[in-house]
Amino acid sequence: MTTRTLAEFAATVKFDDIPANVVDAAQRCIVDTVGVMIAGAGTDVAKVMHSFATRRGIARAPGNPLRLSGPADTAAVLYATNGHALDFDDGLPGAAHASVPVLGAILGATTGRALDAQRLIEAFVVGWEVVARVTRALGTEHYRRGWHTTGTAGTFGATAAACRVGGLSSAATATAFGIAGSLASGLRRNFGTMTKPLHSGVAAGNGVICAELAESGLTASPDVLDGAHGFLDLFGAADSQPSALESPGSPYALVDPGVITKAYPCCYATARGVDAMLRLRPTVAFSQVDSIDCVGPIGSFVALAYARPETELQAKFSMEYALAAALLDGAPHLLSFTDAAVRRPEARALVARTTVREEARCRPEDPTGTHSSPVAGGFVEVRIQLVDGTSRMARVEHAHGSPADPLSWAEIEAKFRACLASTQVPAADTDVLLARLRSTDHPDVFST
């Protein structure tokens, strides 16, 4: 009855029950996610999605990029697709992005209504916990087989958040999960295309639909995650762990295992390689580089499908380009990932000289990666061979932004400001929104 356990948790958690460190972790995620949602509104995929949403009755409030009117599910799709468009949003150990589909569903479900800070935090914590629990229950093989966990597990988290913000009972929430089990999907085959961020959008939109249908009386299995032919049975693999759905909130996943907050706007599988290159950069100039060799644990580069990227979306899934950008630009930033930046002659030259591979020695505790998250454990090593015959090497175990080396509040706020500045949000408006997002008592966080 693990589905009903999650549903009971989602329906009954109150703000006063949530520990202070979990509230702080949630607010860090919310600030970070709002930032990348607003920045993502300037991307090519956002332009396509805006056209799509406009045809379905979505309109923006003047001067407020986070206030939409129109159908709630379409609003959720737009919010969450924009939030994942830059691949700059946070995640959890286990290859899922949790915050964007969850917050997208919350914003969609409250379209046209006030959302106070405590209700926002309640729903966000509930949704994040459900994504984390379902991700862990599915097991790491789920992702390796080609599923995008953000789309699959993310649908359940978005559903939980939409149910919580709507005040649904535990029985109705269990039914909503049953509906979600028939809608959840997302294929890694679409990484490097506009459909990849759409996975987050569809998860958020489906979360709103599942909550509304359950509230309207549609029936579904209240135990969809459990037993033969249940969601875990069909979508999980040999390493699925149904017990992960038990005792939600003990501990809260936001603090254990914690949050991956991205320092760079690209696939997190590149992060340790980028960190290693940044350590080497002060001692190496572009003209000195003969070749670059990057090696990591078995399975750790599975999402990096583009060795020779041609577009910004492909480059976000290319270790070769991420290393080139780190050497040329320093810490990769939003302007490092444009079509023009990817096609720079210097970047192309470095990409052509770079070799990326996986070796069992890089994760001695789990050489084949059978029991590990693709982005955790072991180390990534970058070696630069110089034209004078000497070499430089750096090794990184924990990426900056990982739970072992988290971004500080100051770094999160700096990222937030940079994201809003990228779409010309005035500094004064940025300050007001940031203060509201860090509040625990504001009556309408996203009001104009």
Image (cartoon, rainbow, N blue to C red):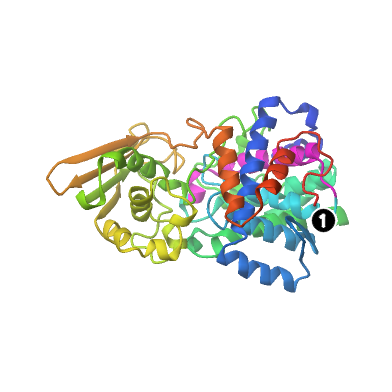
Q: Nearer the viewer, residue 226 or 430?
A: 430
**Left or right: 32 in relation to 143:** right
**Left or right: 114 in relation to 121:** right
Q: Nearer the viewer, residue 439 or 294?
A: 439
Main secondary structure found in the magenta portion: helix
Number of on-image labels: 1
Return the residue found at the far bottom.
Answer: 55
Q: Nearer the viewer, residue 330 or 139?
A: 330
Name which quarter of the figure residue 68 lies in.
bottom right
Return the residue found at the far left.
Answer: 389
Name which quarter of the figure residue 348 lies in.
bottom left
- Asked if one can make out residue 186 in the rendered structure from this viewpoint, the answer is no
Amino acid type shown at disc 1: Glu
Name which quarter of the figure residue 1 lies in.
top right
In reply to whether residue 30 is colored magenta, the answer given is no
Q: Position of residue 22 (x, y in %)?
A: 67, 30
Q: Nearer the viewer, residue 62 or 379?
A: 62
For residue 256, above or below residue 241: above
Q: What is the crowding at mark 1: few (fewer than 14 residues within 10 Å), some, or many (at least 20)?
A: many
Which residue sits at x=65%, y=55%?
80
Q: Which residue is mark 1?
A: 212
For residue 209, above or below residue 163: below
- Asked if one can make out residue 105 in the rendered structure from this viewpoint, the answer is yes
The residue range painted magenta reads: 114-143
**Left or right: 367 in relation to 284:** right
**Left or right: 235 in relation to 396:** right
Q: Position of residue 163 (x, y in %)?
A: 79, 47
Q: Position of residue 183 (x, y in %)?
A: 68, 59
For residue 328, above or below residue 170: below
Return the residue found at the far right.
Answer: 216
